[in-house]
Structures are given as C-alpha cells and as structure tokens.
Image: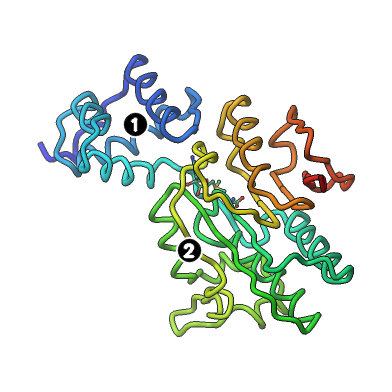
Amino acid sequence: MAWSLRTLPTLNQDQFAQWGKLLEERTGIQLVFQQKAWLESQIYARLRDMGFEDYDNYYQFVAEDSIDSKLEWARLIDRIAVKETSFFRHRESIEYVRSYLQQQINNQSLQGSFDVWSLGCATGEEPYSLAMVVNDCFELAAISPYYGITAMDISSSALAAGRKGRYSKRRTEQVKPDEAKRYLQACTDGSYEVVSKLRDRVCFTQSNIIHARQLPQVSVDVIFCQNLLVYFRRWLRRDVLNALVERLKPGGLLIVGLGEVMDWEHPEMQRTDDDQVQAYVRLNH
Ligand SMILES: C[S@@+](CC[C@H](N)C(=O)[O-])C[C@H]1O[C@@H](n2cnc3c(N)ncnc32)[C@H](O)[C@@H]1O
C-alpha cells in the first residue's frame, strides 16, 4: 500500500517520551502531551521521505552522531520548531529600542557601533523591524555610525527565508504605511522585499541558544529575545539569560517577551519601569 494511503501510526507513550527527551536535550524545546498528534505527523512526514519503516528505526538514525544523522535532525527541526512571527509583533518592545537608541543619540553616549542581537529570529520579520527603527533613528539624527543586527535561529529554513527578505502582502500588514514606503519594495508577484540598505545590515546565522555561553565573545547594545524562552524549562530560561548578560555592553538593553520570564533576577541587571515591556538594563560598573 502507498505510504500516503496508510493511517498515521501513533507514537506510544514511551516513544513520545523518548522523542521529547531528545528534542529537549538538543534544543531546549519542551513538548506537552497535547502536541503528540502534531509531533507524530511531523516525524512521520520525515521518516516516510527517508524511507524508514517505523518511528524506532528513524529515532535510532537521528540519534546517531553521523553527518547524515545531523543533516536529517536539522530537517526535522525545521518542521518541529514553531516559527510563528510577524513584523512588529510586539510593537511596544520594538519601539522601546527606538527610545533607548534615541536617548543615546541625544546624550551623545553611543559607544562606537550599535549592535543588536535578535535571538530566535524565525523568518526575519523581527530583525528587520529592529533594523527599521534603528535606521530611522540614525537617519533622523543625520549620523551614520556602523550598526548591525545579528539574527540567530536554530532553523536553517527560517534563516534562508530571512536572508531572502521577501514577504507576502499579508505578512507585512503590521508595517505602518510610512514604514512600508521607506523600507519595503513591491515585487511584480505581489510580495514585498525589504530594501537592500536594511538587508545589508542584518546578518542571519545559525545558533542554538541553549549553548548561549558559546556565542561570540562580543559586547552588544541590545539583545532581543521574544517568544523563544517560553518553550524552555524555567531553569534553562534563567541559565540562558545569565549567559546573555555577559554579552551586553555596560548600559546595554535586554528585552524578553512580556511575562515570559517571571522569576529571573541578576545582580548586574535592572528591570526598567515600563510595564508594557519586559526590559532590563545592564548596570554600568
Ligand atoms: C515562535 S518563533 C519567535 C520568532 C520571533 N522571535 C518573534 O517573537 O516573533 C521561535 C523561534 O525560535 C527558534 N528556536 C527554537 N529553539 C531554538 C534554539 N534552541 N536556539 C535558537 N533558536 C531556536 C525557532 O526555530 C523559531 O524560529
């Protein structure tokens, strides 16, 4: 019988636990039992394409340490990682970066280049939204220091879409008309492309945030990390955030999703008092 006509085999509880454990060990993403049917369909699509007979054989393969297994794992993650995003998804947070930078420009306290990280950047809408506000600030002030957005994600297909920088009309709905006029270019197929002066500022790179301590030893001005930590256990959220603090310049800004981290404090970080945004500033000492 053709694969496509077969009913989807179910993962038993042990198999679900085994897959969940592997996923969490490798990505931090924690599955809940309600996601079982969805996980089955994602795994099954891959195992069928790869010609495996059942979940166990496929599991043995992806759990191996070979290059082929690693490639297959990357393809599976492309399917499993939730890549939901939009331009200006949480506008208040993006606008907070605008005011933060504006203040530095007004105080003349910019320290050389202005560097931003967008972690779990998905298909690029978030880093491009950040690039829009940063570019706005520098154009308004008529200054042109170096600035760059480093956009990181575990999913290579998401990163590829981000590098392309082309979005359907529906996906650009949250971009205001005046922003779209400046930063999006209509394409003949009805989609919109981010203008090259912004695309050139955004560098997409594959990273696994659970290994945050291995991220480049640089100091950045802003770390933006929304709708990613929420998939992790609480201890891992705290661990990642502690590692991120060390990548911020003194006075640097960390923004997470509102309510995504409830019980994190750090002696070098001070929560800002805007209750529409969950932002922390690294103390200057
Ligand atoms: C729901 S999207 C959020 C996108 C964007 N930050 C936003 O708020 O709109 C979560 C992204 O995190 C990525 N991701 C999941 N686990 C990751 C990990 N361990 N390291 C890096 N990225 C990860 C996923 O591939 C996905 O693109």
Instruction: Give the side of residue 109 with respect to residue 259, left or right.
Output: right
Where's residue 51, x and y in %? 14, 39
Residue 46: name its quadrant: top left
Q: Judge whether 66 appears above or below 221 on screen.
A: above
Q: Amino acid at mark 2?
A: Gly
Q: State the residue position of label 2.
A: 162
Q: Judge whether 113 appears above or below 50 on screen.
A: below
Quarter of the image where the N terminus is located: top left
Instruction: Give the side of residue 180 with respect to residue 111, left or right.
Output: left
Where's residue 53, x and y in %? 15, 30
Q: Nearer the viewer, residue 135 or 284?
A: 284
Q: Residue at x 34, y 31 (%)?
A: 40
Badge 2 marks a residue whose secondary structure is helix
Color theme of the render = rainbow
Q: Residue at x 65, y 62 (%)?
A: 115
Q: Which label sits in the foreground, 2 or 1?
A: 2
The disc placed on residue 40 is 1
Q: Residue at x 19, y 34 (%)?
A: 6
Q: Does label 2 or label 1 sit earlier along the sequence?
A: 1
Where's residue 176, x and y in %? 71, 72
Is mark 2 in CB contact (under 8 Å) with mark 1?
no
Q: Amino acid at mark 1?
A: Glu
Mark 2 crowd level (few <14, some 14–19, many ≥20, 10 Å Cα): many
Quarter of the image where the C terminus is located: top right
